[in-house]
Amino acid sequence: MTIIKLVQIMTTDFGVYIHIPFCKQKCFYCDFPSFAGREKYIDEYLKSLHRELELAAKKIGAGDQLVPCTIYIGGGTPSHLTVSQLERLLEGIHDHIQVKTVTEFTIEVNPCSVDEEKLRLMRDKGINRISMGVQSFDDGCLKRIGRLHTGDMAAERVKLAREAGFTNISLDLMYGLPGQTLDMLQASLDTAAELGVQHISLYGLQLEEGTVLAKQQAMEKLRLPSEEDTEAMYDYLVDFLPAHGFQRYEISNYALPGFASRHNSLYWQDVPYIGLGSGAHSYWQGNRYENPVDIGDYIQAIAEDKFLHIVEETVSDKDHMEEFCFLGLRMTQGIDKEQFRLRFNKDINEVFGDGIKEMMTKGLLQEKDGALSLTPMGMKYGNMVFGAFIID
Amino acid sequence: MDTEKIRNFSIIAHIDHGKSTIADRLIEYTGTLSKREMADQVLDNMDLERERGITIKAQTVRLDYKGKDGQMYCLNLIDTPGHVDFTYEVSRSLAACEGALLIVDAAQGVEAQTLANVYMALEHDLEIIPVINKIDLPSADPDRVKQEIEDVIGLDASEAILASAKTGQGIEDILDAIVERIPAPSGKADKPLSALIFDSYFDSYKGAIAHIRIMDGVLKKGMGLKMMATGKVFEATEIGCFRPQTTELQEMGPGSVGYLAGSLKQVRDVRVGDTVTLSEGGVSEPLPGYRGVTPMVYCGLYPVDSADYDNLKDALEKLQLNDAALVFEPETSIALGFGYRCGFLGLLHMDVIQERLEREYNLRLITTAPSVIYHVYKTDGEMVKVDNPSDLPDPTTIDHIEEPFVKATVIVPKDFVGAVMEISQNKRGEFKSMDYLDVNRVMIIYHIPLSEIIYDYFDKLKSSTRGYASLDYELADYQPAKLVKLDILMNGEAVDALSTIVHVDNAASRGRSLAAKLKTIIPQQMFEIPIQAAIGNKIIARENVRALRKDVLAKCYGGDISRKRKLLEKQKEGKKRMKAVGRVEVPQEAFMAILNID
C-alpha cells in the first residue's frame, strides 16, 4: 500500500466547520445533531450563524477576518437550504472569512436537494469540493435506511456537479446496511468508480442509540448482514478501491492521488478547528468546545454574544499525548515518532512502550520510516490499538 | 472494681433485628458517649460493616450505670460478630459473659441464626434476657413472638422486655434487667491469674492487643505474663478498659473486661480462646474451649497486573495483623501466574477480605472460585488435604475422596417447605428432620455438602422462598463422595484456575452449563475461542466464542473527539478487569462463573 504524505500542515493553520442542522428527513442510522421539519427556523438560524462568524472573526481573526486553510459546510443537509438561503449563508462566510486563501472549501449535498442552480451558486462562491451523501446505489438499501433518493438520481447529480465545474467530488458510501449483500456493495462500488469521482468515504454501519435502526433492532425487525458477510464486504472494498486508484489515507477514506481531504484529516492531526452552528465542536488553544445542540439554545447563546463558551474538556498533557496517538493512527501515514518527541519532549516509547509492543506482537501496529501506523489487520481492529494509547 | 458490681453480657440477634442500634442506645443512655460523639452505630466502625449492616469485628464497651438500688454498676457489653462464618469467635465472646440479651424482631420472630446463637449461649449457662425489638413497627406482634420464644427456644418469655431502639422505649428496663437478672462474675481475686482472650486487634503503636476477661486473679500493669497455647512470654505494658476508646487502668480484678497490650508484634501471638496467666506461678490448666483457627473455604487471589504481586503480599500481611483467621501462602497458576492461596472462615469472610484488598489497598484482583478442603485417600494409604482443585492427585492413585458435610438448619414459612426440600435434594442434601416452630413456621435440617452451600445454595434458597428462608450451618463431618475434577480448556489449553471438583452425577450438566456461561462472559476477540469442559481426557461440552470480525469506530461528526475518547476509556475500563490467559483476555467474573450457573 502506498502511503500518501500529506502536505505538511503549517502550525498556524486551522479549519472552519459550519453546521447546517436541517434535513428533509432524518436517516434511519443518523444520530448527528440534525432535525427534519424545522424549516421555519432556518432564516433565524442563518442570522445567528452570520453573527457567530462575526464574533469569531472579531475574537480570533486577523484584521476582522478569519484566515483558515479549509472550510467545511456539513450537516444535516446544507443543500436542503433554498437558493436564497444558501446565498445568504455563503455571503455571510465571505463577509468574515478570507475565502481566497482557503485551499479546500467543501459542502455536503444530498442528491434530493441539489440542483444546477445551487451548484452554480456554490461554484461562484468559491466552493471547490462537493461531498455527496449517496450511501448506496441500490434502491432497496436506500429505502431501508430512510434515504429519499434513488441510486440513478445520485449518479445523475454527480454528473450535474461535474458539469457545473466541480473537479473534486466525494461520495459517501456505506456497507453492512440492512438487507445489503456483497453483490449490492460491489455494484455500488462499480458505479462509484465509473462516475469519475476523486474521493470516496466508506463507512461501516453502526447502530447508534436512539436511531430508527436501533429501535427496529430492539423490536427484532432489523435484518442486518451477518458479521461474516459484513467482513467480506469490508475485505472486498479495501482491495477494490486501491485497485481503482483510490488510495486509503484514513480508516474510512480513499482518494485519487492529491485528493485526500485536508479538512477531514485535520481532526486527526492535532490541527485546531473552529466549529460554528448548533452542536458544532471546536478545538482551540488546547480546549475542546461544543455549541448547544438544540437550535433554540444555540440561537439564544449567540444572541448573548457567546462564542466558544461551553468547554467540553481542557486537553491536559496526558490527554494531548493520547489524542495525538489514537487520532493520528486513523491516518494510514500514522504518527511520526519525531513529531511526538518535538511536541511533547518525550520519546513515544517512554509513554506508550508497553502498548506499542503489545500491539506490534498482535500484528496490529507497524513501524516504518520512523512512523507508527496500523497494519491492514490493525485497520480492522482499530479500537484495540487506540485503547493501547489510553493511559490508566 | 468490686466483682459483685460487674455484669458481663453479650447481645444475640439475627441480622437486621437491631443488635447494633440497641447497643447504641445503651451507650447513649448510660452517658458513655454523648449524642454528639456517637457516630450512628458506633460499634460497627468499619465502612464495610456499615454498608453490609453486619458486625465483622467484635467490639467491647464498658458502661457505668446506676441501678435501682442506687449503686453504681459496671456493665461490660461484649459485642459478637453476627455471621455464621464467625461461630467460634462468638463462642469465645459468650464464654466471657454471664448473660446475654436475646434481641428478636417483633415482626419477624425467631430466625435460624438466632437459634444457633441462643443454643450456644445456653451451652455456656448464660442468663438470657429476651428483648422484643422494633415494637413501634405497625406489623409488630409481640405476643406471637413471645410465644415463639417459649415454644421454639424453650425460654420463659413472660418477662421479655418490649423495646424499640428507634424510640428509646425499654432501654432503661434492659439496663435494670442486666443489673438484676445477670449474675455477678464468680472469680476469686486470691487465685493465680487466668484471663480469657476473646478477641484481638492490631494497633500500629502498641502492637497486637488482646481483648480479655479476667476469670480469676488480678492483672496488674507490668506483670510478667504467658500465653498458654503458644507459650509466648511477655510483659503487660498497658492494661485498660473500653469506654469505648481505650482507657488505661493500673489493675483489673476478677470479672473485669478490657484490653491487654504487651509489645506483641503480631495478632497471631494473640489467639482468640487462649488463656493468659502469669509467666511464673500461673495456673496449670488453661481455660476450656481453645481451638486453633481452621479455615473452611479456600480460594486463589491473583493480581490482575502481575507487578502488583508484592503489593498484594504486603496488603495480606497487613490484614492478617488484625485478622488471625486469614491464612495465605504463595501459589502459582499456569493461567494466572503468581498469587496467593488464601483460607477463610467462610464466604462472607472471603468477600470481606477481597473487598478490603481492592478498596483499601487499591488492588485489582482475580479471585478463583472458592473450594472446600477435600480429604483425598490414596491407594498407598496416604491421606492428602486438597483445597485447590488443580492439586487433585492423578485419579489412578486415588482410592476415594471425602468432602466436608454440614448440618444446615433452615427456617421458613410452611408454604415453602417443598421448595426448600427440592433445592436441598438437588444439592445432594440428606433430609434429617422437620419441626413446626408454630402453626406457620417450619425448621428443616439437612445434612449437606459444604461445597454445595458455598456454591449457590443460599441464593437459591432466598430466591425460591421470596427471601423468607433463614439459614445456619455448622460443620458436621467428612463423608466419602464420588467426586471428579472438571477441567475447562480454552483455546485448546486447560486453564487450571477454572478447574473445579464436582460430584460425578452433576459433572456433565455442570460442565455444559459452565461452558455455556463462559461463552457469555468471554468477550469476542480477534480469533475464535473454543471453550471445552472435560473430565479426564473426555470432552463433555464445547462452545465457541466467535471471532470478532472488526472493531473500529467509523464516522466522526464534526470533530467530536470527546465522544471517541469516552468510548475508548470505557473500553479500557473493561479491559482492566481482564487477565490474559494465553492469548485469551478473560474477565474476572469468568473465574467465579461456576458459582452461578444453571
Image (cartoon, coloured by chain):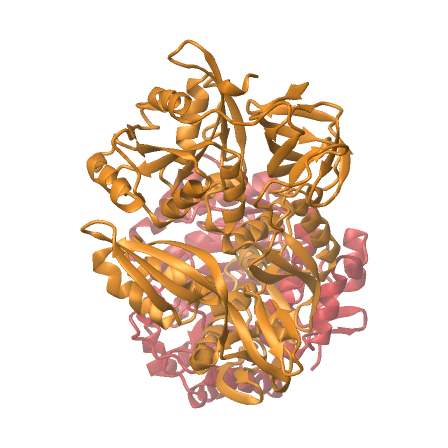
Chain colours: A red, B orange
B69 sits to left or right of B8: left
Could you tell me which quadrant the C terminus of chain A lies in? bottom right
Residue farthest to the left? Answer: B439
* Closer to the camera in the image, B497 or B221: B221
* Closer to the camera in the image, B344 or B557: B344
**Residue B567 versus residue B529 in the image, above or below:** above
Q: Residue at x 52, y 88 (%)?
A: B539
Could you tell me which quadrant the N terminus of chain A lies in? bottom right
Observer able to see residue A335: yes
Return the x and y of residue A309 as percentages of the image width and height.
52, 39
Observer able to see residue A54: no
A52 sits to left or right of B101: right
Q: Residue at x 71, y 25 (%)?
A: B238
**Residue B76 versus residue B198 in the image, above or below:** above
**Residue B63 versus residue A143 in the image, above or below:** above
**Residue B538 versus residue B559 in the image, above or below:** below
Return the x and y of residue B39 as percentages of the image width and height.
49, 27
Return the x and y of residue B337 as percentages of the image width and height.
70, 68
* Closer to the camera in the image, B392 or B269: B269
Return the x and y of residue A251 as percentages of the image width and height.
59, 72
* Closer to the camera in the image, B276 or B198: B276
Residue farthest to the top? Answer: B70
Q: How many marks?
A: 0
Q: Residue A300's image quarter?
A: top left
A125 sits to left or right of B170: right
